[in-house]
Image (cartoon, coloured by chain):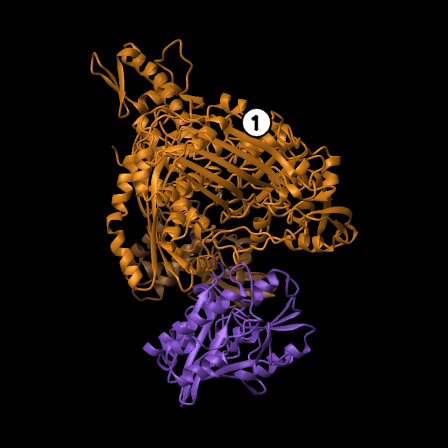
Amino acid sequence: MADIAYHRPERIADAVAIRARAADGAFLAGGMTLIPTMKQGLAAPSDLVDLSALGLAGVEVRSNTLTIGAMTRHADVAASAEVRRSIPALAKLAGGIGDPQVRNRGAIGGSVANSDPAADYPAAVLGLGAAIVTDRRSIPADDYFKDLFTTALEPGELIRSLDFPIPRRAGYCKFPHPASRYALVGVFVAEFERGVRVGVTGAGPCAFRWSAAEQALGARLEAAALDGAALDSSRFNADLAASAEFRAHLVRVMARRALADLLTA
Amino acid sequence: MKVVLTVNERQHEIEAPPGALLVDILRRDLGLTGTHVGCDTSQCGACTVLMDGRAVKSCTVLAGQADGASVTTIEGIGAPGNLHPLQAAFQQHHALQCGFCTPGMIMAAMDLIGRGGRLDEAAVRRGLEGNYCRCTGYHNIVRAVLAAAGEMGGRA
Amino acid sequence: MSDTGIGARVKRVEDVRFITGRGRYTDDINLPGQAWAFFLRSPHARARIAAIDARAALATPGVVGVFTGKDLAADNIGNLPCGWLVKSKDGSDMKAAPRPPLAIDTVNFVGEPYAVVIGDTPAAAKEGAAAVATDFEELAPVVSLAEATQGAEIHAGIERNVCYDWELGDRAAVEAAFAKAAHVTRLEFANNRLIPNAIEPRAAAASYDAATADFTLYTTSQNPHLERLVLAAFVGLSPEHKLRVISPDVGGGFGSKIFVYPEETAVAWAARRIGRPVKWTADRSEAFLSDAHGRDHLTTAELALDADGTFLGLRVKTRANMGAYLSTFASSVPTYLYGTLLAGQYRTPAIYVEVEAVYTNTAPVDAYRGAGRPEATYVVERLVETAARELKLDPAEIRRRNFIRDFPYETPVALVYDTGDYEASLDKALKIADLAGFPERRRASESAGKRRGVGLSCYIEACGLAPSQLAIQLGAGVGLYESGEVRVNPTASVTVFTGSHSHGQGHETTLAQIVSEKFGVPFESVEVVHGDTGRLEFGLGTYGSRSAAVGASAVVKAADKVIVKATKIAAHMLGTAPESVDFADGVFKDTASNKTLGFGDVALAAYVPANFPPDLEPGLSEKTFYDPKNFTYPAGCHVAEVEVDPETGVVRLERFTAVDDFGKVINPMIVEGQVHGGVAQGVGQALFEHGVYDEGGQLVTGSFMDYGLPRADDLPSFAVDTTVTPCTHNPLGVKGCGEAGAIGAPAAVMNAVTDALGVKDLAMPASPERVWRALKEAAHG
């Protein structure tokens, strides 16, 4: 880690250009995943492009969209009056990520860019059908999460903000890993005029929508509707903390609880 | 790279590799050994300091990120004979045994109390989620933080 | 009682440095010109080292040297010994596998160090290590404890990987008891492997002075004299008088810092080899891999009862995991600290235990908080609670029917309990835990869709291992006494030297309380020194809850000697005989004339002997070695109450009550803190913690990401109280409190969990998935 070149540009164009020039560059948002990964020797970028001076932090509500700048820290999302007013479930989600120190540093853009299978935000990004706004385009959530730590982002593409459509109501519930407190399973349920969306994180290699639950809840917005909803757990994660079967069970339980959150919102 | 940072209200200019960790700068360059390292996965919280007023794990902040920041460590909040209310409460309530997690625990509690809001036992326990203690079972730490919060009137 | 004397809640003097960031832990110490060590560790559970090529590493900038096990052996550095010789049933000695500090030909667990790279900086050492090319020939590892005796022979000549096959008790009497039993309760379970995880990782900083041949080793040790003794007598690093071992502030130990480890040994040796101080600090990942782990038993246990629930006999068969090598005291843990405790608090007339200790390709297992006694308590208290359920007896009642009530009591497993009142602890615990209100709380939980359970654990432990002669007959390699020195300075301030070591226990406060009360001097005028072989005569350190019972007793004895001498001096000064002088509250009084002298006057006279007894030496400083006559037997009752979310399997500990009999208490505040911490570790074992290796011998739970250390919001506040039956054979009547929580809690919690679930047994830790599956099976069964 000693001979990394470190950059803190003040313009997005510069950030993208520096990253493009670097032999093996990486964007540095909050660093809550990247720095531990580097410490473990699992990542060794030649250049770090710190995004904190780009002015990408902030929360704004315009008509039916909540825009959160990529460098907005989890603690700020959790505490934001705009977020709590427009999508309280999102504030709750942000307030439950990691621990207080992690929330003080970690940024939403970094979390979404990394697509850790156990991160919380991806559930909301899918559950709300957010748009991932980058330096070059806007990517719909449904096209974004590809696989384990893999997204639709091109090499060097920089997330500027997340645009969250404001739902009528939403709820989020997670089952924390007993040791790490990452989401073993997290389910975000959102009700829109056009229907219900359900985003699931933690269970599979990356966040996904639970379409069967969406259809069931679209027809009948009550917990019982979830009971028969099919759930394919063939690619679910399995580890010491939870088998795929237990994760599948937890998806249903967390979905019911997120729905209960939604219904009391 | 040259890193300029204010630590405990004193400004320092340090030559450090950009990939150096803030905790190493504090411990090795500045000799502030009250900030401890207890893990390598950013979980134990023994390295917690305030950076620009917020609790952070200094093992997960790079020198470059700390450039220009203002950092407060355990050494900066009080001294023997002139203890901060949290320090005094930790002693009064026997909230430490081996003392290793204590500086990080106190700095995390500073942040928790400083954020305001009503603190009860559950809120303190949740608020200290990022700090491990292996000695006390947290029982007396919770008491100390609640007592200090009362005394500090919600201000850190 | 004064506000700083014995029994007072005195704030700790050591806290001031810790709360202000001025503690001095080993990693805070930097020696001039120091280099840094980085250890190369085996990535394989079992392999032959075919070749180590260090050329590229030596060419790395900043690398000072690369040393292997062969280098140490060539310099006559010996193997790390195990300090307790256990004999098998057939009388043969245990089979101790040789353990070189750095592996030489084979590596036997993931994380075993086999080479050390010394660099000018930590980064250089690490980079150098990355450049070392090691050629391993992998061998099939033996990982499963259950199948350890069927695997390959890990150490040449140690058949079936069995270290020893030990027994204790009267087998025939037990068979007879079972033959006439009306009921037999049987359980088979594992006592899960734990990883101690003191928050301060191990560290060492060593220097060597070639001109004087003096070594200085700063290290994270619970017992620096033992470290010195082993390094001198067995490893052959240095003559004992030329090696100074200093344990400065130590950030928790829980047993894991008792042992003499490879890394500290290699660091000290390397300082001499390169002619520069060398420092090493483990990171957490290394700690997970290489600190001695704890527990890890497989046990079948049976309790024979008559129709009334009276215990007739206990039969226990345990397989204990030693890991790849015998750590310093590993062999004693599942034998003399386990089998001997199986009577618990009960009059079980016949007990027989067999323990087979086996090697596996995993990290060495040794004493961890409680060491053998939590495992014994788990056996007894899970059996007793299960028996009560099977016989439809009240769990408290079945215990009452079997409590030992007459003391001293000789158990069928070689201990003599000196005193106790088990019913008193039980009664008080049930009251504080509000067991009467439990049915109502259970109904409330059930109406919220939850399950609720309550569990008891009436534990006993044996602390302050003793006496030395007996222990040595049973195989101990060292004595089990403690040293104390009380040095009264001319101005009547007092320096106390103790061979006990504080790594959180607060000796600097409690020993000062004792001595200030004895001498009637201000608490602030007493300073306690510990942890430095250069300042103390000798010491055996702190483990096994021995500091109060043994260490403080030594200090009391030394203080008593001071008072005897001071009384002679005072009598001379008062013009009377020592027999007519009383000493109380710091004042010597001639009972005939009522003339008095202060302690300070006598202290000064001892060093300025103007008017002094002709047959006395000047000075006022005394030493003792205190060797206890017996163990002490703390005991108590713990009550756990849990709520289970049947949908997620999450167990929440809602209430925990601990009523302990520690004998007399020196500082209740500190004692309560010890209980809180012990309980948290015991709850951790029951609900969260588990050291797991995969089939290939890789540690799956190698970081806090996977190893569940309890956090603040995993635990409730604890209700803690005491009962008192003073220990009958030490001067303070104290018993020891450091391990009780970890000993009593696991069984209490698991009794509560199984009660909530309505199942006979569940494996620790009671993880959400295990609980969920148990409920599913119960529903289908």
- Determine the colour of chain B: brown
- In front: C266, or C340? C340
Count of numbered tags: 1
| Residue A76, quarter of picture | bottom left
Residue C18 against residue A238 in the figure, above or below? above
Secondary structure at numbered mark 1: loop
- In front: A68, or C694? C694
Residue A57 against residue C72 in the figure, above or below? below
Residue C605 against residue A231 in the figure, above or below? above
Spot occupied by residue C294 in the image (x, y as percentages of width and height): 52, 43
Tag 1: amino acid: Gly
Spot occupied by residue C75 in the image (x, y as percentages of width and height): 73, 34
In which chain is the residue bearing label 1? Answer: C
Identify the residue at horizontal 54%, vertical 66% (top origin): A244
Q: Considering the image in quadrants, where does the C terminus of chain A appear?
A: bottom left
Residue A251 against residue C233 in the figure, above or below? below
- Determine the colour of chain A: purple
Q: Is residue C201 left or right of residue C521?
A: right
Q: Does the rendering let one see residue C526?
A: no
- In front: A27, or B10? A27
Q: Is residue C455 left or right of residue C502?
A: left
Circle 1: is it few (<14), some (14-19), or many (20+) Cα within 10 Å?
some
Spot occupied by residue C58 in the image (x, y as percentages of width and height): 76, 51
- Determine the colour of chain C: orange
Residue on which disc 1 sits:
C477
| Residue C176, quarter of picture | top left
